[in-house]
Image (tube, coloured by chain):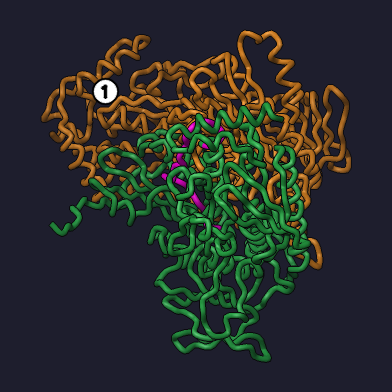
Chain colours: A green, B orange
Amino acid sequence: FSQTLIMSRKMLIDGEANNNISNNEEEVQYDFDLFVIGAGSGGVRASRFSAQYGAKVGICELPFHPISSEVLGGVGGTCVIRGCVPKKILVYGASFGPELEDARSYGWELNEKIDFNWKKLLHKKTEEIVRLTGIYKRLLSNAGVKLFEGEGKVVGSNEVEVTQLDGTKLCYSAKHILVATGSRAQRPDIPGQELAITSDEALSLDELPKRVVILGGGYIAVEFASIWRGMGSTVDLCFRKELPLRGFDDEMRAVVARNLEGRKVNLHPQTTLSELVKTEDGITVRTDHGEELVVDAVLFATGRIPNTKRLNLEAVGVELDRTGAVKVDEYSRTNIPSIWAIGDVTNRMNLTPVALMEGTLFAKTVFGGQLSKPDYSNIPCAVFCIPPLSVVGLSEEQAIEQAKGDILVFTSGFNPMKNTISGRQEKTLMKLIVDAETDKVLGASMCGPDAAEIMQGIAVALKCGATKAQFDSTVGIHPSAAEEFVTMRSVTRRIAFSKPKTNL
Amino acid sequence: MATSMSTPKLTSQKALQTLLLYHTANSKLPATLSPHSSSPLSAFRTLTSLSSRCCQSLSHHRRRRFTTRAESENGAEPRSYDFDLFTIGAGSGGVRASRFASGFGASVAICELPFGTIASDSVGGYGGTCVLRGCVPKKLLVYASKYSHEFEESHGFGWIYETEPKHDWSTLMANKNAELQRLTGIYKNILKNAGVTMIEGRGKIVDPHTVDVNGKLYTARNILISVGGRPFIPDIPGSEYAIDSDAALDLPEKPKKIAIVGGGYIALEFAGIFNGLKSEVHLFIRQKKVLRGFDEEIRDFVAEQMSLRGIEFHTEESPQAVVKSSDGSFSLKTNKGTSEGFSHVMFATGRKPNIKNLGLETVGVELTKNGAIQVDEYSRTSVPSIWAVGDVTDRINLTPVALMEGGALAKTLFLNQPTKPDYRAVPSAVFSQPPIGQVGLSEEQAVKEYGDIDVFTSNFRPLKATVSGLPDRVFMKIIVCAKTDKVVGLHMCGEDSPEIVQGFAVAVKAGLTKADFDATVGIHPTAAEELVTMRTPTRKIRSSSQGKTDAETKAVAGV
């Protein structure tokens, strides 16, 4: 063991050649080389990889519960317990509704009435996340990471305190502390807000709400709109902007809005909620336009905030930004050299694979002897509305803003082959943004069935600077939707470069 | 100028030389390559707009006069032709070549047999195999048959049906055929809008510049043969009882119990279709494994998954006879015995190029030993004015490849750009259930070509299956050249494989490395993200230890 420790120490020094660490620190004996607070995607990855580099690692996490709070969490974190995974399971479940409708035109004779048993799906979902949290625990123990159950706090630049379930406190010293506590859904401050739920509860409701209002226009809002609508509920989606999914390509936003409407989600653009009132019949929701809706559930999908409140960070001098996120440099290091942070708690790009990347590169930097910065360019992502949206690289608007020359836009809107027989009126849209001078593909987006699966390979191409000519030289896979990405021959529009206005 | 409009030529000296380099076998300078006329590009543009304006109103006769007059003015051409290009066969390759040629300013005619779902010497239809008897109807039936699996999955996700869904074959056939009618119409419109003259009937080559359709003669500077292929059934006793894929796509009723003979992609696809539609399916293959030529691990994996879905495999069984019994059912006699009680026996035993009755012998177009039309890298036959693309040349028999060949040919002939189709890293799919997507080399091919390779594999249960409780799995494989780190092969079997592989095909075609894959962030949660998160090689194969490679491979693979 001591051998390992010495080895890892040595690596630490190599890895930190550029950072000023006081010399006498080397002689200090710590309980751990690394102590991680929060065992979500980023924390688990960083712990495991650090341990593989020879570090002695401890990690703490709150007790498991599907709905998080200050004192409840679970190994696996948001992604596994109340994010990506359960959400995707519900999206799968919801997709069957419209699928079954489509089956009739393909010759399938189904009962008029098809039932959906929410409780069964919920049970399956819980089973699956319990299984996964177990897998995560095993991953940690197999990597030799010591797991503590309890609430972690930073009490010094090299000191953490873990309050266990029974109230006893453990105190450990660590050469490095990594904050990976993630984020939580936030609630807007409107009268009756306590009647509403967040995505945590929405993934664990006892009953399927038959009538829902969703407040928010982000990806979580549109995903839940699709989930509940697919299960047959009436869904009203209220959002502040004219279109949902601010920050995404405008044309794709319009397609998502059109598809939601096509699947009978009621859209309320430029609308916010002013009041929620409990009534006999459910919850009465008032919008700022004076509309009144009576529903069974109200979901706030109005953003997430970093989990930094009870970590005692400010007391030890760790700087937070105004949203409460931990401020870090390019290597995920806070202003206190021994304290680092990754994942949603740093509010950089809040995606599981990004937290994984940050965790991996943290371990490499601190214990692997190689300074490694995460690269945030061309990170693909997906919105699992039905049908899904997936993008990589720049939107048309971003491309125009960053342009140093003309931009070529290639789009393809088509009726997917499956719809030709089902009669479903829903077009798929694909889009490539190309730099006219270099021929580099700057952005790709798609809204339609399988978009998320299709985009992954496209992302590899974009990450490596593939040109439109390289797309064109690739032969299609026929018949697929994805082949459209390599057969967009004629440019839809060319956007001439206009010099940005300056103050000079 | 007018000459160049209707008879564009390859005039760039450099391009010509490039082209000539590849013409050692047919060293005689062909007519289309004669360097005497100069054709400014502006002329093409004029005609392009002209042809798109006039499209249908520009009759065959007007075009002809136009050409003749122009050429007599120029005086350089010894004879005039009705068309710059006459295409025989309006399938994927023929339509693409014709449209593009017309777009580049050529006068083009195309002939095709009357529409019908089952091809014969007198029946075909605009759109060809892909649209009428291949990719499209097949995929529609795959969609239809996949639902039964989805119904099963949906149980796990809380969906309940009072009675199990039943399938009505005739609804499906009616809706499918309506869609095919629509598509063949679209193809006709595409040709019409491109200004291509359409002639219905069987084309036969009379001389290097003349095609006979229903007794009428048409002359053309260039003739393109794009008549495709047709299913082949071996000549065994009772083979007349067997159906081929044409018939299988348009049966009057759903088979109760079907024997499918063959281990290729068509056999697997139909096995999946009929199995999904609840027929009892028996697959008879001559070899030990299905899909000869595919990556070995993929071959094993897909067969295992298909067995789990209820398809019965009969391996190493060669068909010897089909026998009709008194109750109207069929038996299949093989080297291993007789299987009885089939409502249908289907042969998916390969396809052959459609070279009969084309007049190829009379003009001296050479064939390969497999009976395909022999062409050079520019799709030119042994007769300089006759060209061929698509399945009739039996190169890579895929629609997108025929499109590539057709597009390249139009460029070569009418755009001054001698263009060779590029057959490297052509991706393809098998729409079995689960489907397969692949691009580049199999492990076996990669070992042969590169010696030292690293193989990354992943065999996992997808999220959907963990919830549905079905035994579905996904298998993925990346093959990397150890020396260059280049990804030389990528294979996948599992849901959405064809859609997933397309983007990766761009990456493989662009010559990207494993490090490039690793640098890409995943899309979570998807199956595809697995392909960018394979960190540890499953095995490293080094040529120094090649003697034991095989055994090692099999031991570690363990699919």
Give the residue displayed 29% in from the left and 11% down from the top. Answer: B28
- The chain letter for the residue carrying disc 1 is B
- x and y percent of residue B146 in the render? 68, 50
Q: Is residue B349 visible?
A: no
Q: Nearer the viewer, residue B62 or B379?
A: B379
Looking at the image, the residue that sits furthest to the left is B73
Q: Amino acid at mark 1?
A: Thr
- Determine the secondary structure under disc 1: helix
B348 to A138, vertically: above or below: above
Give the residue displayed 84% in from the left and 28% down from the top. Answer: B333
A482 to A81, vertically: above or below: above
- x and y percent of residue A438 in the render? 28, 38
* Magenta highlight range: A366-384
Q: Quadrant of residue B490?
A: top right
| Residue highlighted by disc 1 | B32
- Quarter occupied by the C terminus of chain B: top right
Crowding around mark 1 (Cα neighbors within 10 Å: few <14, some 14 to 19, many 20+) is some
Answer left or right for A320 relative to A397: right
Looking at the image, the residue that sits furthest to the bottom is A280
Q: Is residue B137 visible?
A: yes
- x and y percent of residue A360 in the render? 56, 40
Q: Quadrant of residue A421?
A: bottom right
- x and y percent of residue B125 in the render? 50, 43
Question: How many numbered dots are placed on residues in this image?
Answer: 1
- Quarter occupied by the N terminus of chain B: top left
Answer left or right for B549 relative to A359: right
Q: Nearer the viewer, residue A183 or A289?
A: A183
Q: Quadrant of residue A463?
A: top left
Q: Nearer the viewer, residue A105 or B354?
A: A105
Magenta part, dominant SS? loop
Give the residue displayed 74% in from the left and 41% down from the top. Answer: A141
Tell me if residue B8 is in the magenta stretch.
no
